[in-house]
Amino acid sequence: MAKNKLRVLPGFGLSLGYTVFYLSLIVLIPLLAVFLKAATLSWHEFWHIVTDPRVVASYKITVGAALSAAAANAIFGLIVAWVLVRYSFPGRKIIDGLIDLPFALPTAVAGIALTAVYSKKGALSGVDHLWTTSLVYLESKFSFLHVISVIGRKITYDRPGIFIALIFIGLPFVVRTLQPIIRECEPELEEIAATLGASRLQTLRRVVLPELLPALITGFALAFARALGEYGSVIFIAGNKPMYSEITSLLIVTKLEQYDYQGATAIAAVMLVISFILLLIINLLQKWSQRYRKS
């Protein structure tokens, strides 16, 4: 008779039961309560609330800014993670520790700090001036670029402020996801590719990126999910102009302050569905990348 393996945790049944109970208590029941509260509305009332022009504009701003910030974090987070793992330089541990600052810093404090830094009288006020001047110059020289006005003429109290705040809070997710995978990647593979005549671009595209792609997509998904529901760091720097720089989280809080609980839960339910769909698509892409890597 085979000896029973010693398990530190209790048996499968008890562990699974506790897992389902804890997950239901913390995640599933609150999410279900949102849909149940929204279900008290008639279909006409629900549709009227979630398709209001102001609400639709907040959807576009929130999802668009979250996707853009997550994409930027995927690119620059990869570079930061690569530098921190592959190179030794003075202050590396300090920089590595600062990566976790958005985790520990209250989001409201982050929003106030970013606003103070990028405002016209802030430490990086020149960045705001340079951004505005560049947009004006490009639009004056190239008339077909007038569409970039929708981006925003300035950083603080405008759409670019949302983008910067979401990059700030999402960067650690990408860096911390990629660092263990980069440590496991053997530098010898890159050297072998170089000896076989591969250029740096070919080595990056055919050797490095296939190994990092699943982790990169995971980091992108985490940064996107975090940015989609961000509130504290955005409201101080966005300007919160309805139909222009108002995010959905702020709109939900506004309705709660007006005691419009049904309207708030209806909008929240739509955001949950959007989040589930987008995360499902990202997870399918991640599975595809893993299969591509194995093949």
Image (cartoon, rainbow, N blue to C red):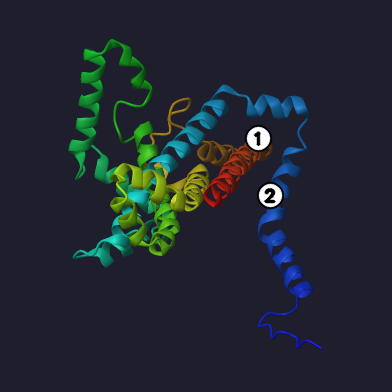
Of circles 2 and 1, which is in front? Answer: 2
Q: Earlier in the sequence, mark 2 or mark 1?
A: 2
Which of the 4 quarters of the picture holds residue 270?
top right
Location of residue 25 with respect to 111 vertically, above or below: below
Tell me the quadrant of the picture where the N terminus can be found.
Answer: bottom right
Q: Is residue 277 left or right of residue 244?
A: right
Tag 1: amino acid: Gly
As rendered, which of 199 and 37 lies closer to the eye?
Answer: 199
Q: Position of residue 172 (x, y in %)?
A: 40, 55
Which labelled disc corresponds to residue 263? Answer: 1
Location of residue 135 with respect to 88 vertically, above or below: above
Q: Is residue 186 left or right of residue 213?
A: left
Q: Residue furthest right?
A: 1
Which labelled disc corresponds to residue 288? Answer: none
Q: Is residue 128 left or right of residue 1?
A: left
Badge 2 marks a residue whose secondary structure is helix
Q: Residue furthest front?
A: 196
Q: Position of residue 164 (x, y in %)?
A: 35, 41
Residue at image location 32% in from the left, 42% down from the top: 201
Contact (Cβ within 8 Å) of mark 2 with mark 1: no
- Is residue 227 shown to the viewer in this render? yes
Q: CA distance from mark 2 to mark 1?
A: 16 Å
Location of residue 78 with respect to 269 vertically, above or below: below
Tag 2: amino acid: Leu
Which of the 4 quarters of the picture holds residue 93?
bottom left
Q: Position of residue 34 (x, y in %)?
A: 69, 45
Residue at image location 62% in from the left, 40% down from the top: 268
Q: Residues within 10 Å of mark 1 (few under 14, many from 20)?
A: many
Badge 1 marks a residue whose secondary structure is helix
As rendered, which of 170 and 267 lies closer to the eye?
Answer: 170
Q: Is residue 210 left or right of residue 201?
A: right
Circle 2 is placed at which residue position? 31
